[in-house]
Image: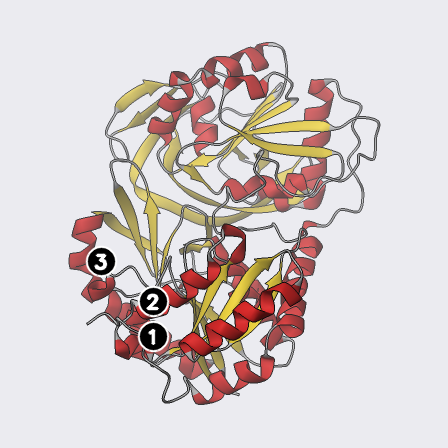
Amino acid sequence: MSGGLLVAGTSSDAGKSVLVAGLCRWLARQGVRVAPFKAQNMSNNSVVTMEGGEIGRAQALQSAAAGLVPSVRFNPVLLKPGGDRTSQVVLLGKAIGQTSALSYRDRKPELFETVLATLEGLRAEYDVVICEGAGSPTEINLRRDDIANMGLARAANLPVLVVGDIDRGGVFAHLYGTVALLSPADQALVSGFVINKFRGDPALLKPGLDQINQLTGRPVLGVVPWNVDLWLDAEDSLSYTADGVVGRPKPPVGEQWLRVAVIRLPRISNGTDVEALACEPGVSVRFVTEPSRLADADVIVIPGSKATIHDLEWLRHNGLADAIGDHAARGLPVIGICGGFQMLGTKITDSYESGAGTVPGLGLLDVEFEFQREKILRRLDGFVFGEVATGYEIHHGTVVNQPGNGLVTLPDGSPEGVLKGAIAGTHWHGLLENDKPRRHILEWAAGHANRNFRAAEDTSFAQIREAQLDLLADLVAEHLDTDFLRRLLADGAPSGLPILPPGAP
């Protein structure tokens, strides 16, 4: 088996990322050397690779599904939205500047050269490369400069599968319209459909499947059912249940739940850090956006931010800053991660990211921060409550006056972060994915919150993530036409596919 495939979606959050992960794991389990690829991602959820570069977190998950170490080659262009309608551009793992939506169009030809060269290298090295599109391939206002969807498919001659989310409603119109608004040359590569997140009786859906096949000349390869156990590592870290609950909480091991409120910042970055907490029995994790939801919280977590100063102002404007201060004044625990850590300090000097100069922090930790032009990207190891831990850092803000009482102790004995009473802060992302340190942090928090909570001894975040990847592969094997998939990978798009009107010129 050899070849490539592009998984596109009728919209953002249609299920492209998880389907790519499922396809990668399904192929890898058969001994196929497979790699993921996303030419251009727009996300503030990112990880640091072993090369010291930055890629989208979804591509790191897809790498794990394929049995690979994450690499900057799997996501050559990453856009990280900040304030003022601008995004930071990350090319092959390194930030190369800021751009607006309009100015970005001028940079695309140069970026596309890198994208195509990177994909060509991967296709020479691996049996199969499963590419993920971005948003919808039928953004007709952006098609001329597209480097992530049909522009990529055309340049690399990739067959395309279109995924539609039936949970949103109107899936058949979405599928038909996605094809019909493409140019004839683009339509010639769209080879089939996948319907995602189906909750009903498949027999009721079958007439629609038959009709969309007749209308488009393209088959529905399968209908993937909604599965309540799939929730980790969403591309949009806020794609949880309607009431903000993260994960599927299990009953506590001890007598009481530990209630964790995570501030849902407007420019939240790596909000997925808290998902490891939601894997623990008896830990209820909920995203909140207004002060009343903090009233019964045992622990408050302030996550990372792509625009720390702007989000700190937002906390103050809507009363959350005062509510966090009241929570801390009662001796209850507060944890800040990356940008959230910076907000906990006494002051932040930022002449780079926001240009705001020096602004006061929340004042819960006696530490100051200064933003630097160069972004810090590194993977680290150390000790948390005496237990071995690993993590990674992605930030411009640096500590000016590091206190001696760190949350993390680095191998040379120096501190990272701050632990003072019931307040803790760290620049480390991924710290909570370390099982033993996470349990210590939860029990530290429960002690300060006066909750009769006990952490489970057998929760393994890595095993939970692996189980979800295996579940994705099982869904592919059970619900998709895998023979058709193999033919697509081996032979490319079928010839003679119908062109639907109007067919964009």
Query: Callout 1 environment at 10 Å: few (<14), some (14 to 19), or many (20+)?
Result: many
Residue at image position (48%, 43%) is 270
Real-space Cα distance between discs 2 and 1? 6 Å
- Give whichever of discs 1 and 3 has the lower sequence position: 3
Dot 2 falls on a residue whose secondary structure is loop
Residue at image position (64%, 55%) is 199
Dot 3 falls on a residue whose secondary structure is loop
Query: Callout 3 environment at 10 Å: few (<14), some (14 to 19), or many (20+)?
Result: few
Residue 313, percent from left and from top: 36, 22
Q: Which quadrant, please, contains the C terminus? A: bottom left
Asked if residue 55 is positioned above or below residue 162 in the image, the reply reads above
Residue at image position (19%, 57%) is 105
Asked if residue 278 is positioned above or below residue 233 in the image, the reply reads above
Residue wearing tag 3? 141
Q: Which mark is residue 153?
A: 1
Q: Which mark is residue 22?
A: none
Mark 1 or mark 3, whichever is nearer to me: 3
With 448 as the anchor, is 169 left or right in this view?
left
Residue 258, percent from left and from top: 71, 28
- Disc 3 residue type? Asn
- Disc 1 residue type? Ala
Q: Is residue 51 visible?
A: yes
Residue wearing tag 2? 149
Residue 290, percent from left and from top: 49, 21
Contact, CB < 8 Å: mark 2 with mark 1?
yes
Real-space Cα distance between discs 2 and 3? 13 Å
Dot 1 falls on a residue whose secondary structure is helix
With 441 as the anchor, is 325 left or right in this view?
left
- Disc 2 residue type? Asn
With 193 as the anchor, is 78 left or right in this view?
left
Residue 363, percent from left and from top: 45, 15
